[in-house]
Image (spheres, grey):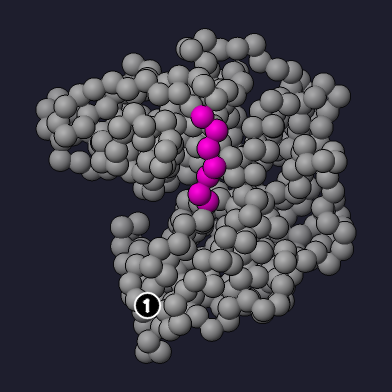
Amino acid sequence: MPAKWNSAPPRRVRSGGALTLVFVGVLATGAATGSWGGDESRSADRDTAARIPVGDVEEPAREGGEPREAEPRDAAEELVSRSGDRWSSAYSAREYDGLRRKLDGEYVGTGISVSRQAGADTGADADERTVRVTEVAPDSPAARAGIRPGDRLRSVNGTSVATKPVTEVVAMLRGTAEGTTAADPGSAVRLGLTSEGRDRTETVRRVRLSAETVVSEQLSPDVNRIKIAHFTEDSGQRVREAVRSTPDGAGILLDLRGNSGGLVTEAAEAASALLDGGLVATWDDDGEQRSLYAEEGGNTESPVVVLVDGGTMSAAELLAGALQDRGRAVVVGNRTFGKASVQVPHEMADGSVAELTVGHYVTPAGRDLRREGLTPDLAVETEESALNRARTVLSGLASGS
C-alpha cells in the first residue's frame, strides 16, 4: 500500500492523469545529475554526472538537425516569472507530456548510459578524460547497433564530446537545443565511437523505453545494494520488492547518489519498505500543513546504510533524512544538494504548464534542508571511496560488530 497523507492527497490539476500528482524537484534539479532534459539543464550548476553513469534517458530535442516550431508556453512563463522562485519552471503542453511519461518510468532514447572517466587513451587527446558507454539497455537501438559497455563515445551528430561536461553530452545524445520541443520516437542520432581501438560511426533511432529506476545487486553475502536513480511511478513498490529479496542476515545499502528527486509519494513508499509506520516528512501546501506517514510492516531488522552525494536532491533527501532522523540508517557520503521544495503543476489557458513551488518539507526531526542539505553521519573525502566505506560500515552492522 502507498504511504499515507494525514489529509486529502495533493490536488491534481486535471483528471485522468494527464498532469502529474505533486512531485518534488523533478525538473529544475535534474541536470545536476544529467538525468532530465529541457530548461532545467540551465537551473543547476553542479556537474555530479561526471561521477556517475548517466544515460540518454530524455527527449527534448531537434529532429534531423532542424528545430521544430515550439509550442506556446508564454502564459506559463509569465506566471513563473511573477513567482520569483528559482525552482519554478514553464513548459509547453508537449514538454509536460514528456515529463508525465518520464514520471511514468518511460523515456525516449537510444538505450545507452555514459560517464566521463580518466582513461588510458593515447594520441592527441591523451590528456582528456574520456566519455565511455557504461551501460546498454537490452534490446535497445544501441544494443542492436552493436554498441557495448566500454566503447568510447567520440562525437554526437558530428560534434566532438572530448571537452564537454557529461550533462552536455547527455543533452547532445537527446538532441536537446534551447527553444525546441521533444524528439519523437524514430528521430535519428549519429554516434562516433571507438571500439577495440577502431573508429566507427553508428546512426541509431530513438525509441520509447522503460526506465529501470531501481536496481538491486547482491555485492556480497552480507551486502544488498539497492540503487534508486529517480522516484517515478512504481519506484516505491520496486524498492519494497528489492528489500524483500535481501537475504536473512544481510544488510541493505541504499544508494541515492545522483538521485535528483521525483514523486514524493514514491519516496515515502520507499521509506515504508524500511520503517514500521511513523512520520516521514511534513510540508506546507500554500499555508496548510501536511504530514506524510509510512505504512506499517516494513523491514526493521536488516541494517541499512544510505549513500548520498551532492547530487542527492529533493525527494531523495526526504527519504535519506527520514531514515536518518528515525535512527533507521547510517548515512555515508557527502553533503546533499539542499533542495526541499514541493511543486505542483498548473495548466494555463494556452495549454502550457507552470510548475510552481507551494511549500517546503522538513524531516521528522524538524530539519529544513533548503540551505545546508543533509549532513551524513560519516563523511568521505572522495567519491571513489564512498562505496567502499559504506560497504565496510554495513558489513560491520550486519555482523553485529
In this view, which residue lies farthest toward the left?
Answer: 123
Q: In this view, does 195 lie to the left or right of 105?
A: left
Whether residue 14 is visible to the viewer of this picture, yes or no, is: yes
Quadrant (top left/top right/bottom left/bottom right) for the C terminus = bottom left
Which residues lie in the magenta part?
207-213
> Which image quadrant for residue 131?
top left
Residue with the most extreme bottom position:
400
Coordinates of residue 388 in the picture (x, y in percent) = 31, 67
**Is residue 221 on the magenta stretch?**
no
Task: Identify which residue is drawn at 52% across, 51% down.
Answer: 213
Quadrant of residue 244 within the rendered picture: bottom right
* Residue 377 as seen in the image, left or right of residue 192: right
Q: Can residue 390 be seen in this view?
A: no
**Which one is in front, 176 or 199?**
199
**Residue 349 place in picture, x, y as percent:** 86, 24
Q: Answer with left or right where residue 11 lies relative to residue 51.
A: right
Q: Which of 82 and 165 is in front in this view?
A: 165
As drawn, 266 above or below 193: below
Residue highlighted by disc 1: 222
User: Residue 147 at what x, y percent from top left?
Assistant: 31, 33
Q: Where is residue 361 in the image (x, y as percent from the top left)?
A: 71, 59
Residue at position x 59%, y 74% in the image: 274
Q: What element carries label 1?
A: loop
Three-letter amino acid code of the residue under disc 1: Asp
Total labels: the figure holds 1
Q: Residue at x 39, y 73 (%)?
A: 223
Quadrant where the N terminus sits is bottom right
Q: Which of 2 and 392 is in front in this view?
A: 2
| Residue plotted at (59% across, 67% down) | 240
- Quarter residue 367 falls in: bottom right
Asked whether 211 falls inside the magenta stretch, the response is yes
In the depicted structure, whether residue 242 falls above or below residue 251: above
